[in-house]
Image: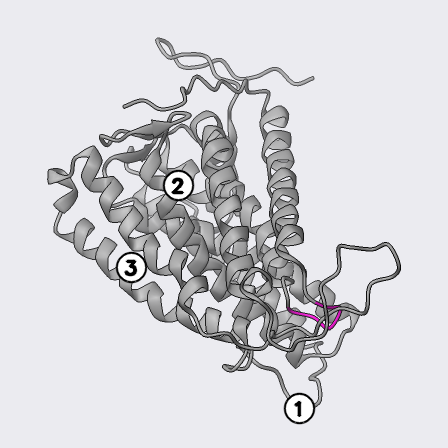
Amino acid sequence: MASKAAPPSGSTSSPFTIADAARAAWSCVSDVFSPSPPPPSKDDTADITVVMTLILLGQLAVLSVVFVFLTPAKGGGRWLPPADTDKGAYERFVLAYSPVWMGVFAVIIAGQLYETFTAHTYMLVCTTLCLPLFFYPFLAPALPSHAPPPKEASEGDNTSLPSSSTVPSLLQGYPLKATAWLAIYSHIGNYWYTHYFYTVLGASYSMPSLRLNDVPLPLYFATFFYFSTYHALSNLLLRRVTSGYQRTPARGIFLLLLLLALSYCTAFMETLTISAFPYYSFQDPFMAFTVGSAFYGLYFLVSFPAFFRLDEFKEGRLSLYQSAMDALGAGMLILILLDAVRLWLGMPLTMAGQALRY
């Protein structure tokens, strides 16, 4: 086994060297293309800009090459489900509401209003922004399901949905199932996954807040409307590909590459936009942007396709119970992936959180 590099004098020993590996890879690229590389700088801004530009352009180039081999489907593709279906109406509502919460956050960050926030202010802002999405399933008009009802259940099978009505009930409609799916996923992500950010990425929150398991409680709500937007947008892209191109090996490869790129870009864009908030910080910004985006992207590599299939295909609708189980299963798979990375790095996981504390 290769020996690990000794830490600098006076620093705490740590087995984590992903940032060093990323910088070493960038150094190799610089040596090839630049005869006289610039001296290292304490400010990683320039390195982050160059490396992220290369990564994103590389992803676009690979997708462009594979795209050439796709075979268009008859009738073309679509971005959204029909507006007169429950899934179509839900996605349109989420997309229309997204600029609202983004605008509120932009004003708070640009005006540095957070400097006057107390723990109660953070909680009020995040819970208020969640309310339209939470209440939508109960206030939205009843519409036919985007997916057809499943085949009649076999004798003794009580898990399938009734197929007698074209308009599902509240409990079987897509809006409530999507809301439950994202609420479960958001809770798991904050309660469990945040500790991997603390351990692997050296992240920390320092704003005043009531905490659940050492995670600021407002984040449980903020994550919900963040993820609602992310998954509505990912549905657009995945649907455009699956409906617009014939099922071929090339489409399968393209979908996989698209998921990888979309997951990475989503994680990077969130990291970039939140970097202006001083009370969420990383020990190493270079590592957080470059490699940390891949680590965070593991969330979406699993959740984007899992959420997309909910009431999407002709195989039929899932029940509310099945949707909840689906979210829990996706959450467990993500946890396994995150922990596999932690084990590979040889890092201990410490969770010292309490039920509720300030």
* Magenta residue span: 312-316
Q: Is residue 277 visible?
A: no
Residue type (three-letter) at the residue carrying disc 2: Tyr
Identify the mark nearer the N-term, 2 or 3: 3
Q: Can you say whether 236 is above or below 310 in the image? A: below
Q: Is residue 313 magenta?
A: yes
Q: Residue placed at 34% from the left, 53% from the top?
A: 130
Cα distance in 3D space between marks 1 and 2: 42 Å
Q: Earlier in the sequence, mark 3 or mark 1?
A: 1
- Sort mark 1 into few (<14), some (14-19) or many (20+) by Cα contacts within 10 Å: few
In the displayed structure, does residue 121 sit left or right of residue 41? left
**Nearest the camera: 16 or 200?**
200
Counting other residues with Cα less than 10 Å from the Cα at mark 2, is it few (<14), some (14-19), or many (20 or more)?
Answer: many
Element type at marker 3? helix
Does dot 1 land on a helix, a strand or a loop?
A: loop
Q: Position of residue 230 (x, y in %)?
A: 46, 58
Q: Which residue is mark 1?
A: 75
> In terms of secondary structure, where does tag 2 sit?
helix
Q: Residue at x 20, y 37 (%)?
A: 120
Q: Vertical placement of 243 versus 12: above or below?
A: below
Three-letter amino acid code of the residue under disc 1: Gly
Q: Is residue 54 left or right of residue 36?
A: right
The alpha-carbon separation of the residues under discs 2 and 3 comes to 17 Å
State the residue position of label 3: 102
Left or right: residue 62 compared with residue 70: left
Mark closest to the chain's N terminus, 1 or 2:
1
Q: Which residue is mark 2?
A: 220
